[in-house]
């Protein structure tokens, strides 16, 4: 069981994290806007989740044939 409040890689206390916007991919296609949390000491990713506040991504329209 992991100790709460410590980075699993460097072992330092996690009082702050770097927050970054990332795109969730499914079979090579972008599907959702996500948030990544990483340790400020060693930059290991601590978690990723779907951004609950993000607006839906616009769907691209197929190119018109003509």
Image (spheres, grey):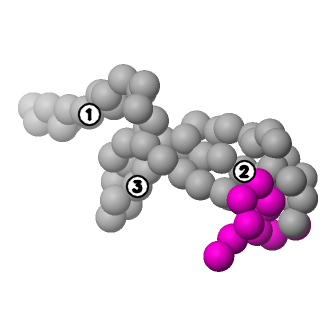
Residue 27 image-quadrant placement? bottom left
Q: Secondary structure at mark 1?
A: loop
Report the span colored magenta.
1-10
Mark 1, Cα crowd under 10 Å, few <14 / some 14-19 / many 20+, is few
Please indicate whether residue 6 sits to the left or right of residue 53 in the image.
right
Residue linked to disc 1 = 60
Magenta region, main secondary structure: loop
Quadrant location of the N terminus in the rendered image? bottom right
Residue linked to disc 2 = 38
Residue linked to disc 3 = 25
Which callout, 3 or 1, points to the residue nearer the camera? Answer: 3
Q: Residue at x 72, y 59 (%)?
A: 4
Residue 61 percent across, percent down from the top left: 20, 32
Residue 36 against residue 26 in the figure, above or below: above
Q: Secondary structure at mark 2?
A: strand
Residue 13 percent across, percent down from the top left: 86, 53
Residue 12 image-quadrant placement? bottom right
Most foreground residue, 46 or 15: 15
Q: Residue at x 34, y 54 (%)?
A: 29
Most foreground residue, 56 or 38: 38
Between the C-alphas of marks 3 and 1, the distance is: 15 Å
Quadrant location of the C terminus in the rendered image? top left
Most foreground residue, 33 or 11: 11
Q: Residue at x 66, y 47 (%)?
A: 37
Camera sees residue 61: yes
Q: Secondary structure at mark 3?
A: strand
């Amino acid at each position: 069981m992991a100790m709460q409040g410590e980075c699993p890689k460097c072992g330092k206390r996690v009082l702050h994290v770097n927050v970054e916007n990332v795109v969730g991919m499914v079979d090579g296609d972008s599907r959702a806007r996500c948030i990544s949390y990483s340790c400020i000491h060693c930059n290991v990713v601590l978690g990723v989740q779907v951004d609950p506040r993000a607006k839906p991504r616009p769907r691209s329209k197929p190119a018109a044939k003509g």
